[in-house]
Image (tube, rainbow, N blue to C red):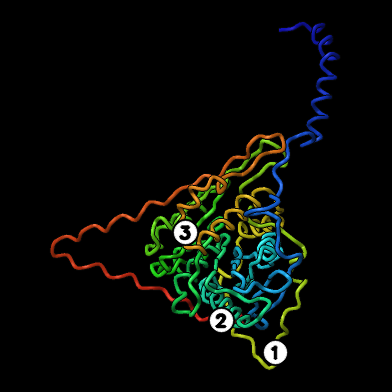
Amino acid sequence: MPSLSHLRLALPLALPLVLALALVGSASGVGAATPPAQPKEGPGGQAYAAASVVKRALGRAGAVTLAYYGNGAAPAGGRPVAVLLHAWGAVNPQAYGSWIEHLARSGYLVLFPRFQEVGRTRPVDASGIAATLVKDALAELTGDQEAKPDTTRLALIGHLAGVPLAANIAAHARTTGLPAPRLIFGAMPGGIARDDKARGIALHDLNDVDPATLIVTVIGDRDARAADIAARRVMRETTGVPTDHKLMVRALSDDHGFPALSATLAAPAGGNAAYDLGQIKLPAPDPKQKPAPFKWSADMTLTGEQTVLVGQINAAGTDSLDYLAFWKTFDMAAAAAFSGQTATSLKSNPRFIDMERWSDGWPVRRLSLETPRPPAPPKPAAPGAAPAPAKPAAKPTASGRGQ
C-alpha cells in the first residue's frame, strides 16, 4: 500500500490529467467522427425533381387522407403511388414529414390515410378503414392532371402496426377493388394481435397477396425481438408469394462517432414541422350528418408503453439511418418491384447494403440481409383421417369512416 506522503505527491501531478479528461468528457462529441449526410444523388439522395411539395386533404371530416406530391406537371405516365401507414397512435404526418418530403419531391404521389382516431377507433376496424380511405383517395384523384396517380406502380409502406395493415390491404385488394400493390415495405413490423379481440392488428388470411408482390421488411438491432417475430410471421403467412420475392433487412446501430446511430423502433420516423396536420385545412364536418354511434372498448386507448413509443416517434429526428437504411432501401426496392425484378436483384447489388462512411473514413456498419425459409411442405394425413378444415378468410370490417 503506498504511503501517505506518496499519495500527497501524486495528487498534484495527477490533477491536470483528471481535469483534462473531465473537459473532454464534458464536450461530448467534440472532434468525433460525424455520420454520413444524405447522398447528393441516387437512391435515398437529394437530387430531387421538384422544388416544393403540394399538400392536400382529401375526403370528408372523419375520413381524411392527406395527399402530397411535387409541384409542377406530372410525368406523362403519371406518378407512382406510395401509401404510408403510420404506427398505432402516430396519427400526425409531421412525425414522418422528412420521409414524405423525400418521396414527394422524388416524384411519388404520397397518400397518408388517417385510419385512426385516437381513443375512438378499434384496431379490428383499422384495416377496412384504411382500405376504404385509399380507394376513395385514388378515385378522387383519377383524372387529376397534377396528382395523376399511376396505380400500376403502387407501394405500401408500413411502420410498426402499419405493416400488418399493409399486408391485410394487399390480401383484400381484389375484393375491395384496390389495385394490387407491387411492393409491401415494412419498417420495424409490430403491433400484430393474436385475434380480433386482442390489442393490436390481427393478420387476415394472407394467402391472396398477389404472387408478383415484392415484400421487404427492415428491422433494427434495438428492441428487435418483437419486430423480428412480426417480420417472420408476415413472410411465413404470405404463402402465395414466392421466396425470391421476399427479403428481410436488418439495420445495425453504430456508435463509432457522434451522434451515434441507434436502430430503434422509432428510427423510421423523422419529424418535419412543415407537415404538421395543423398546416392543412381539413374538411369541415357536415352539420346535417349525425356522428356515427360510439361504443368504447379498452383496445381503443394507448397503453403506457405505446404512449412512450409514440412520444419517441413524434420526437424522432432524421439521420443516416433514415437516408440509407429506410429511404434508400425503399427507393431501390420500389424500382425493382415496379420493373418486375425479384429480391435477388437487391441482394446482388452491393449498394443496397452499403451505409457509406463516417467522416474519418471508417465504414458505417452495413445492412445485413436474410431470405426467409420457404414454407415447410404439409405433412401427409394419417390413413383414414378426416381432412383438416380450411382456415376461413377474414374479411375487413365495414369502413366506419365516421369514427
Quarter holding residue 33: top right
Q: Nearer the viewer, residue 45 or 61?
A: 45
Residue pointed to by mark 1: 286
The answer to whether any part of residue 132 appears in the image is yes
Residue 374 locus on image (x, y percent): 36, 54
| Mark 2 surroundings within 10 Å by alpha-carbon count, few (fewer than 14), some (14 through 19), many (20 or more) | some
The residue depicted at 65 percent of the width and 59 percent of the height is 310
> Contact (CB < 8 A) between labels 3 and 1?
no
**Marker disc for residue 341:** 3
Give the amino acid at mark 3. Gln
Q: Nearer the viewer, residue 336 or 328?
A: 336
Measure the alpha-carbon separation of dots 2 and 3.
Answer: 37 Å
Position of residue 125 relative to residue 382, above or below, is below
- Furthest toward the front, the residue is 76
Q: Does label 3 or label 1 sit earlier along the sequence?
A: 1
Residue pointed to by mark 2: 400
Dot 2: element:
loop
Give the amino acid at mark 2. Gly
Q: Does label 2 or label 3 sit earlier along the sequence?
A: 3
The residue depicted at 63 percent of the width and 50 percent of the height is 324
Measure the alpha-carbon separation of dots 3 and 1.
Answer: 47 Å
Q: Quadrant of the C terminus?
A: bottom right
Horizontal side of residue 276 vs 235, given as left or right: right
The residue depicted at 50 percent of the width and 57 percent of the height is 216
Position of residue 350 relative to residue 210, above or below, is above
Residue 14 locus on image (x, y percent): 81, 16
Residue 321 locus on image (x, y percent): 64, 49
